[in-house]
Image (tube, rainbow, N blue to C red):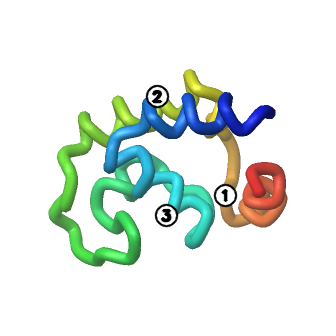
Amino acid sequence: MMSSDVSSIIKQLNELEMKILAHIYHYGPDTPWLLARRLLGAAGWRPIVPEDEVEQAVQHLVQLGLLHEFRGSLKRSGHQFREALA
């Protein structure tokens, strides 16, 4: 990917999308439900970001090819999934 392509993609990301990418890079894969509650190390049952906003942001990242949806056990396959994105 050319640096101009990367710059173009980065310009399309909002703050929430950048935080989601940072969270997944640091903590590994999470569901949108969990991302809404523990984004970047937050804790608690109450969402810190509205769940629908997280879902929309995740879908946008999938459309851009920056995330891939994974259906399966994260406990068993999380390490392989993280390596595939790194």
32 w.r.t. 13: above or below? below
Q: Is residue 8 left or right of residue 42?
A: right
**Which element carries disc 3, helix, strand or loop?**
helix
Please give left or right for residue 44 compared with residue 75 in the image.
left
Residue 56 position by quadrant: top left
Query: Residue at the spot x=82%, y=51% of the render?
Result: 84
Dot 1: few (<14), some (14–19), or many (≥20) neighbours within 10 Å? some
User: Which of the pair 8/51 is nearer the observer?
Assistant: 8
As drawn, the label of residue 23 is: 3
Q: Residue 59 has which mark?
A: 2
Q: Nearer the viewer, mark 2 or mark 1?
A: 2
Label 1 residue SS: helix
Residue at x-position 51% and y-position 61%: 22
Q: Quadrant of residue 50 in the image?
A: top left
Q: Nearer the viewer, mark 3 or mark 1?
A: 3
Across and down, in percent, residue 53 comes to 26, 37
- Give x and y (percent) for residue 7: 58, 37
